[in-house]
């Protein structure tokens, strides 16, 4: 796992979770041609494939295993097909050296560098996100998006940490646990990026992330009477106990993922109910 297997891998590729394709292209073919001309990093190519392909099996394989020789060859094959480029033409493209795109803003670059050098890395990430998504600074920006930004940084940090631990993992159980965490945080991170990018381009929420459902549920809770909240405070722990027992008794059940999600939602709702009751 990790970078380095792909023979066309561009040295110095940045972390995949915070990497975004900035080519000013509109068609899939133009995006892919721009990638093979200016980039060729596995992470960027896999992201183009994720956005434009419905092949969930391969998307998860690329996310789980990363840049291996086999995955790189498969990625190139499928991207060439998506772009409608025949094998001979694709090979000709690969024979050309990568032509990096200079995206540096040279306005007060030195001053900005000196200022950022004194700022902690987690704060720098926020700066970069606010540059990428200026609407985060606007008063009318939904609070849900600001919550997602915090989650974005958290999922990125967990991904990087667990991905690094995979290199020293030795037991099958440890490898399985870390691999699941890496994929889970990767997919969560991508879903948040989709929400932010949609709001950036459309000016309205995409609404697919669970944070929007929780926001709607919170409004319902805030409008409830104390009597109804007390009932929920009594009943929710029963539901939590019931689902927890099912997960412990049959962790391989096909409903496990849905049960885990339900458990998380019940725990969140109980916490909000207690806040409203000031318990």
Image (spheres, rainbow, N blue to C red):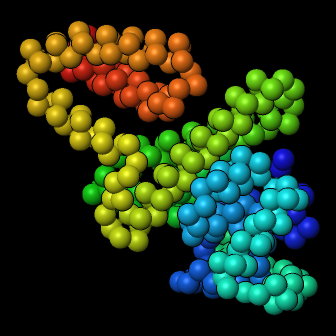
Q: Is residue 90 above or below residue 182?
A: below
Which residue is located at x 50 percent, y 41 percent? Answer: 151
Residue 117 seen in the figure: no
- Residue 103 lies left or right of residue 269; in this view the side is right
Q: Is residue 228 above or below residue 58?
A: above
Which residue is located at x 41 percent, y 24 percent? Answer: 263
Q: Is residue 142 above or below residue 91?
A: above
Q: How many marks?
A: 0
Question: Which quarter of the picture shows residue 48?
Answer: bottom right
Which residue is located at x 85 percent, y 59 percent? Answer: 70
Q: Estimate the x, y position of residue 232 in percent, counting from the top left.
A: 21, 17
- Residue 165 lies left or right of residue 210; in this view the side is right
Q: Estimate the x, y position of residue 155 in percent, counting from the top left.
A: 58, 41
Residue 148 seen in the figure: yes
Where does the C terminus fall, quadrant-wise?
A: top left
Question: In terms of depth relative to the viewer, which is nearer, 178 or 133?
Answer: 178
Which residue is located at x 23 percent, y 41 percent? Answer: 216
Q: Is residue 2 above or below residue 71?
A: above
Question: In terms of depth relative to the viewer, which is nearer, 124 or 90?
Answer: 90
- Residue 1 lies left or right of residue 194; in this view the side is right
Q: Estimate the x, y position of residue 12 in percent, counting from the top left.
A: 83, 62
Q: Estimate the x, y position of residue 21 in percent, counting from the top left.
A: 62, 70
Question: Which quarter of the picture shows residue 262?
Answer: top left
Question: In terms of depth relative to the viewer, which is nearer, 72 or 278?
Answer: 72
């Amino acid at each position: 796992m990790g970078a380095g297997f792909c023979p066309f891998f561009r040295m110095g590729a940045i972390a995949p979770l915070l990497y975004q394709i900035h080519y000013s292209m509109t068609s899939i073919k133009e995006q892919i041609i721009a990638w093979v001309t200016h980039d060729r990093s596995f992470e960027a190519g896999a992201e183009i494939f994720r956005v434009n392909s419905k092949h969930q099996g391969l998307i998860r394989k690329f996310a789980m295993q990363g840049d291996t020789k086999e995955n790189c060859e498969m990625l190139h094959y499928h991207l060439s097909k998506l772009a409608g480029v025949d094998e001979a033409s694709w090979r000709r493209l690969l024979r050309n050296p990568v032509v990096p795109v200079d995206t540096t803003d040279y306005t007060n670059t030195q001053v900005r560098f000196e200022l950022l050098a004194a700022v902690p890395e987690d704060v720098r990430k926020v700066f970069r996100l606010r540059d990428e998504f200026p609407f985060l600074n606007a008063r009318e920006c939904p609070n849900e998006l600001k919550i997602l930004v915090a989650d974005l940084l958290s999922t990125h940090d967990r991904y990087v940490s667990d991905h690094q631990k995979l290199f020293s993992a030795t037991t099958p159980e440890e490898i399985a646990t870390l691999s699941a965490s890496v994929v889970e945080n990767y997919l969560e991170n991508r879903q948040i990026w989709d929400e932010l990018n949609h709001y950036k381009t459309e000016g309205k929420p995409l609404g697919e992330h669970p944070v929007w459902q929780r926001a709607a549920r919170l409004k319902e809770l805030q409008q409830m009477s104390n009597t109804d909240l007390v009932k929920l405070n009594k009943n929710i722990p029963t539901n939590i106990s019931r689902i927890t027992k099912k997960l412990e008794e049959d962790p391989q059940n096909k409903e496990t993922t849905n049960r885990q999600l339900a458990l998380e939602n019940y725990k969140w709702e109980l916490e909000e109910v207690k806040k409203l009751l000031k318990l």
